[in-house]
Image: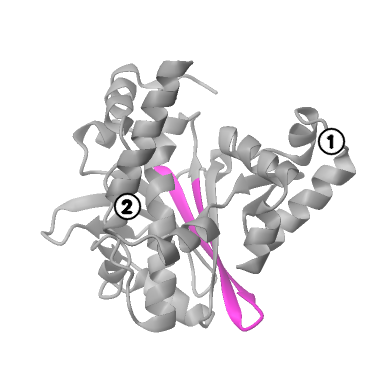
Amino acid sequence: MIDISTFKPKTVYVIYIAAAPEKVWQALTDPALSPHYFHGCRLEIEPKVGGDFVARFPDGRVNVKGKVVEWSPPRRLATTWLVEWVPELREFPPCLVTYDIAPAGEAVKLTMTESYSWDVPDALLAGGRGGWPAILSSLKSVLETGKPLGITLEPPRGMMEVVKDLAATKPWLKTL
Amino acid sequence: MDAVFKALADASRRELLDRLRAENGQTLGELCARLDMTRQAVSKHLVILEEANLVATVRRGREKLHYLNPVPIHEIAERWIGKFERGRLQALSDMKQALEARDE
């Protein structure tokens, strides 16, 4: 298992959702619900620490894969992330995605944290920074109204060039 | 949503958000070192930004790190910008950037 104490949060997003913590947990872990808010992807998560995590495109191809690092329903879910759909990204070290669900009055405070073990450049983080607000807003909409937002996204311009450059230079191999 | 607009209606608070956009995950000390504001003032502005959910904080050991949280701004954009308008607005924004860069 990876040592998560070496990971530093790089992107932290918070959204308030009018739903019970159990409902938010279910939405994050139920493969039938995820396509409605996660850009059409189906998230399959083995419900135990060390279990497999896979996010699949509607056609079945693997988008992201990883391992479950923390499974504490309905409060905390952490998985490693290895982006599969871009060949160059397969060589990158995994990042850690953590969801914290905290009651906040009648609502829930959902915090998504993307952490890295290496000094990841901003241009790479831009991919998640474009995607997460849409995913979280859509998740909120699904839970509160039963309807997704229907947002389509593409990787930010310039990001793929940065990915190719990093795959060639492998800066994570340098010790921090 | 009122809290978001109130928080954004202040140049110092927008400056703090710009600083976090440039470098996410700063401590109060790091933010103060680069600004012409007292520690108390920065601290007060951060509370208002956190209450508006524009800043998210993470405890890491003894440090409290501050992160820009654009989710409320995204929700405002979703409310008033339709999916068909987004492409045209992006084109206009790109054109403005290209033209203004040429003038520099």
Q: Is residue A102 magenta?
A: yes
Nearest the camera: A142 or A85? A142
Q: Residue at x 45, y 48 (%)?
A: A96
Kindly check if marks 2 and 1 are in contact, taking CB atoms under 8 A apart as contact. no
User: Is B69 situated above or below A95?
Assistant: below
Q: Residue at x 23, y 50 (%)?
A: A63
Q: 10 Å neighbourhood of mark 2: few (<14), some, or many (≥20)?
A: few
Nearest to N terminus: mark 2 or mark 1: 1
Residue A47 position, x and y percent, is: 37, 69
Residue A143 position, x and y percent, is: 41, 79
Residue A16 falls left or right of residue B47: left
The amino acid beneath tag 1 is Met
Residue at the far left in the pictured view:
A59
Nearest the camera: A116 or B5? B5
User: Is A78 situated above or below A36?
Assistant: above
Q: Find the magenta span and give its range.
A: A94-114
Q: Residue at x 13, y 59 (%)?
A: A60
Subunit that carries the residue with mark 2: B
Q: Secondary structure at mark 1?
A: loop
Q: Residue at x 24, y 31 (%)?
A: A88
Q: Secondary structure at mark 2?
A: helix
The amino acid beneath tag 2 is Arg
Q: 10 Å neighbourhood of mark 1: few (<14), some, or many (≥20)?
A: few
What label sits on residue B37 in the rendered view? Answer: 1
- How was the colour assigned to the protein in this rendering? one colour
Residue A149 falls left or right of residue B63: left
Residue A69 visible, this orientation: no
For discs 2 and 1, the disc positioned in front in the rendered view? 2
What label sits on residue B102 in the rendered view? Answer: none
Do the residues marked 2 and 1 share a common chain?
Answer: yes
What label sits on residue B86 in the rendered view? Answer: 2
Residue A29 visible, this orientation: yes
